[in-house]
Image: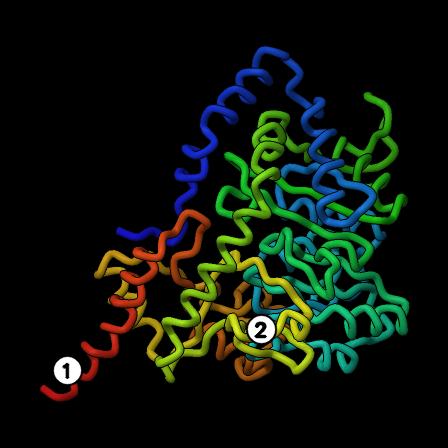
Amino acid sequence: MIPLCDVKQQYLSLKAEIDAAMQAVAAAGNYILGPNVKALEREVAAFCGCDHGVGVANGTDALHLALRALDIGPGDEVITTPFTFIATTEAIGLVGATPVFVDIDPFTFNIDPERIEPAITSRTKAILPVHLYGQPCDMDPIMALARHHELYVVEDCAQAIGATYRGQPVGSFGDAGCLSFFPSKNLGCFGDGGMVVTNTARVYERVEVLRRHGGRVKYYHEELGLNSRLDELQAAILRIKLRHIETWIGLRRRHAYFYNRLLVSQVNVQRPHELSSQGPVVPLFELPQAERIQKAVYHQYTVQLTDRDRVAQQLTAAGVGNAIYYPVPLHRQKVHFGLGLAEGNFPCAERASRMCLSLPMFPELTEEQQSQVMEAFSACWDVQEACRSA
């Protein structure tokens, strides 16, 4: 069996360091907002090109608290993508605001900047781009629109820590960047965890208060907050892993290029695209570095293909892990039926939900495993042709 993601291998490669760090935390007895949390906040913020970081309980809380820190609430609208995990709009709803969807770019899967401006109204307060699958959004036009219309930008970087756009890390463009440390993420802990990174002191100070029940001083509370603190034990683990993340990103990119080369002959498969000065392109090795305007980190390696469900079933039967991120776009989820949106409103997102399939992707993946994945993948069409001939 070739898993979609194997988090145990990463632990085993760092076992001595991680075990020692966990024992040190246990022995110190400082379990809540201790020295590892404070150090990790500084280190992750610096890695993301930001001045401040606030560790919180999970990535959803990071989004929720970032929106609250910007005073986004009832009556406000937040423009975002319908093709992402529910946490994005969950956070918008939790502050009482309304998500306003615009369709995605069919090649990068990210929000299409050209569709944002027509969706802006007098109630629009923010744009919430999601760097899906580790592919940075096209941030220049998004930021230009935000400045022109005086809107906040909150970046959902849950799948994209370490990704860059024109050499600048995601999370550092807008008013806040929101990270998830869920175990399968590119920087994952042993449970839930998240962080808000920002270059705005006001956002940092507000999130820091909100995560501690809305108070600066213990037992003195200024507003209703949350109990949303990153665990000291998880912070100690993440500090060790952060030292290796650039190496792991390099391996993920190498795996993506390897898949791309093996899939060149599959005309019925759309490979992942990266943004370049010429628009979306398939990132082959021969593409000059000067033409790239993004560095994707491949949290997932996701292709688009017809007859996706059949292929997924056959891969599973062949022992190849795979997943569908995401089978139902958010505007067609029951929780958002009240928005009055229908099938056909966002055709690119709907097409992606029908055709996307993610293949095994993790740093420790070997070329031999990838070749086996591709053999099983190619066999899906061989089986189909054999059935037709019969």
Determine which quarter of the picture holds residue 29. top right
Q: Secondary structure at mark 1?
A: helix
Q: Label 2: which residue?
A: 108
Q: Foreground residue, 291 or 389?
A: 291
Determine which quarter of the picture holds residue 121. bottom right
Examine the rendering and report whether any part of residue 153 can be seen. yes
Q: Foreground residue, 320 or 103?
A: 320
Q: Is residue 254 placed above or below 307 in the rendered structure?
A: above
Residue 298 at x, y percent in the picture:
53, 59
Residue 244 at x, y percent in the picture:
56, 41
Dot 1 crowding, Cα within 10 Å, few <14, some 14–19, many 20+ = few
Q: Are marks 2 and 1 in contact (CB under 8 Å)?
A: no
Residue pictured at 35% horizontal, 57% vertical: 367
Q: Quadrant of the C terminus?
A: bottom left
Instruction: Please name the amino acid that badge 2 sits on.
Output: Thr
On screen, residue 69 versus residue 155, left or right, reads right
Residue 122 at x, y percent in the picture:
87, 73
* First-in-chain label (2 vs 1): 2
Q: Label 1: which residue?
A: 387
* Label drawn at residue 295: none
Instruction: Please name the amino acid that badge 1 sits on.
Output: Cys
Q: Is residue 93 placed above or below 374 in the rendered structure?
A: above
Farthest bottom residue in view: 389
Q: CA distance from mark 2 to mark 1?
A: 33 Å
Residue 323 at x, y percent in the picture:
39, 60
Residue pictured at 57% horizontal, 58% vertical: 297
